[in-house]
Amino acid sequence: MTGFRGLTRRPRQDAGLVRLRLELHEDVVARALDEIRANPGIEVGGKFVGFVEGGFSAGSERWRDDLAELRVIVVAYLDAGPGKDRTAVHHLSDTDYQFRLFQEVARDVPDLHFLGIWHSHHPNGLDTLSQGDERTGAVTVNNPGHEHDFLLSSLAVDFAGLTGGRHFVFLRGRPGFLEIDPADVTVVQGPNPVANRIAEIAGRLRPEPPDGGVTWARTAAGKAVLLEDRIWLARYPGLRPFLRRGLMVWRGRIDLSGTTADCEYVYPEDFPATPPIVDVRTSDGANAVRYTLPSAAQRESGFHFALSRLTDLITGGRVTWDDTWDEENGPEERPPGRDL
């Protein structure tokens, strides 16, 4: 076991230091460092998996003492996947791929846990979690489906990787995040069958072409469609392209009438024979619209029509089957009731 201290940095004043026995297997540290060095200009990262020894409740009066008694062992991380979206200032993983990868390895290792996230800020120099990172951590740890009352969030701030980085923890029901005392973070050695199994499964899930097997996207016409859609979808910076089980999907959040909505814009497997589908719903689930576009040629106008229908619902407007599109927005066809 090798102990290390991160580079000396002043923690956030609202964070403070907490005790938590965090052990990172040397394979995790080495692999993260390799990925950082191979991508000097973009953020990289993945999802930590491993084991937990001890119990912890964020609502306990002695939660600090309980947290200090936890032993969290990170043995591997799930890579960002083929549908990742990364730049010098943001990192988005292919979560569908990561979920499939975790499901498969969990069949072999039932006591394996999802422990948290790591990513790098080495291209931009930010030495703490961004507001986006904080939102992601808070939403994840407070999700009822998340197994633990804590969530790790490790940050590699430079080319020293995780050993020179900072390690934070989010707690269920508590605002902000806390920094783990660097003295409690250690690197461990030894056999790592879980990491080997993850690498084997990932190799089976990933040997597909860059378009994820979406054959229409490899044609000249398909590439033209993607270029056209990328231009007008740029109005919605919260939407990102992903690959999901042979489908190409734009997914993310958009703002409608002051309300946040979750949106999916899906190209069917047999596109363009079958037109795209827009599924948009408010984050609280109170209102939703699922709309199959009239044709593959009416993508932009059909997308905006679906958003306008949800806006009507949000603002108290009434959707009627007599509504038609005008010349500016699209063809005069009635939206199919089975979807709306």
Image (tube, helix red, strand yellow):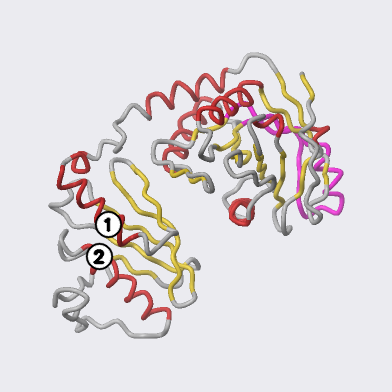
Which of the two residues, 132 or 251, is positioned nearer the viewer here?
132
Q: Is residue 59 magenta?
A: yes
The answer to whether residue 212 is above or below residue 150 is: above
Q: Is residue 282 left or right of residue 138?
A: left
Dot 2: element: helix
The answer to whether residue 199 is above or below residue 132 is: above
The answer to whether residue 324 is above or below residue 110 is: below
Residue 103 locus on image (x, y percent) = 47, 35
Residue that mark 2 sits on:
300
Q: CA distance from mark 2 to mark 1?
A: 7 Å
Residue that appears at 18% across and 50% down: 271
Where, quadrant-wise, is the C terminus in this rendering?
bottom left
Check whether the beta carbons of the residues at disc 2 and disc 1 lie within 8 A of each other. yes
Q: Is residue 118 visible?
A: no
Mark 2 or mark 1: which comes first in sequence?
A: 1
Residue 2 locus on image (x, y percent) = 77, 20
**Residue type (three-letter) at the residue carrying disc 1:** Asp
Residue count near mark 1 (Cα–Cα under 10 Å), binned few <14, some 14–19, many ≥20: few
Residue that appears at 72% across and 39% down: 166
Q: Is residue 27 magenta?
A: no
Residue that appears at 28% across and 41% down: 246
Magenta-drawn segment: 50-76
**Residue type (three-letter) at the residue carrying disc 2:** Glu
Residue 206 locus on image (x, y percent) = 37, 29
Residue 33 locus on image (x, y percent) = 60, 27
Which of the two residues, 320 or 83, is positioned nearer the viewer here?
83
